[in-house]
Amino acid sequence: MDRDDELDDEPEELGAEACLRLLSTVPVGRVVYTEHALPAVLPVSFEVVPDGRLLLAVRRDSATARGLDGTVVAFQADRLDPLTRSGWSVLVHGRADILRDPEQILRALRSELRPWTEEPDPMFVAVVPELISGRRLSASGHPVPHA
């Protein structure tokens, strides 16, 4: 293997716009927050809204909803192919706040974004990205999946 082949396996660093574009192609990610003074990770349904915020759907009155409100969280989503060892991963850090504005809640309800569990009255949490990083991985000789 020569030096050029090794460079082909290096992850490509992605800019914030590319990261948000990739995030908009998947419906589920993982939110990392603090619960009982310990790190907690939970898969959540989400969408990227036009202003660049992430909108998460959680169960109302859940420990997750309480743990997210007014805190700094991490959010991660990816699309990886284990056969080609390629794909992408995006990590977002930002402040999470429960939506309280009736107009924003109504807009979220119209989007059909819902928690994974049956929840007739979901709660929505907005994450304002402060740090966004991402990587695209491609193995030598395999095409790079683009969104």
Image (tube, helix red, strand yellow):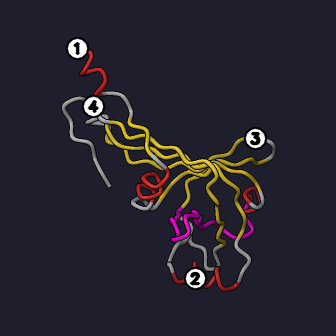
Q: Mark 4: few, some, or many residues within 10 Å (few <14, many ≥20)?
A: some
Labels 3 and 4 touching (C-beta < 8 A)? no
Q: How far is mark 4 from mark 1, CA to CA?
A: 15 Å
* Amino acid type indicated by mark 1: Asp
Q: How far is mark 1 from mark 3, CA to CA?
A: 45 Å
Q: Nearer the viewer, mark 3 or mark 4?
A: 4
Residue drawn 64% across the image and 80% down it: 104
Question: Which element is circle 4 on?
Answer: loop
For the record, the magenta segment spans 45-62
Residue 117's x, y, as percent?
Answer: 56, 66
Q: Which mark is residue 38?
A: 3
Furthest residue toward right: 37
Q: How far is mark 4 from mark 2, CA to CA?
A: 41 Å
Dot 3 or dot 4: first in sequence order is: 3
Dot 2 corresponds to which residue?
107
* Amino acid type indicated by mark 4: Ala
Dot 4 or dot 1: first in sequence order is: 1
Q: Is residue 4 above or below residue 93?
A: above
Q: Is residue 117 above or below residue 64?
A: below
Dot 1 or dot 2: first in sequence order is: 1
**Side of 55 where 68 appears, left or right:** right
Dot 1 or dot 3: first in sequence order is: 1
Dot 4 corresponds to which residue?
139
Front residue of this view, candidates 118 and 42: 42
Residue drawn 58% across the image and 50% down it: 75
Q: Nearer the viewer, mark 4 or mark 1?
A: 1
Dot 1 corresponds to which residue?
2
Question: Which element is circle 1 on?
Answer: loop
Residue 59's x, y, as percent?
Answer: 65, 68
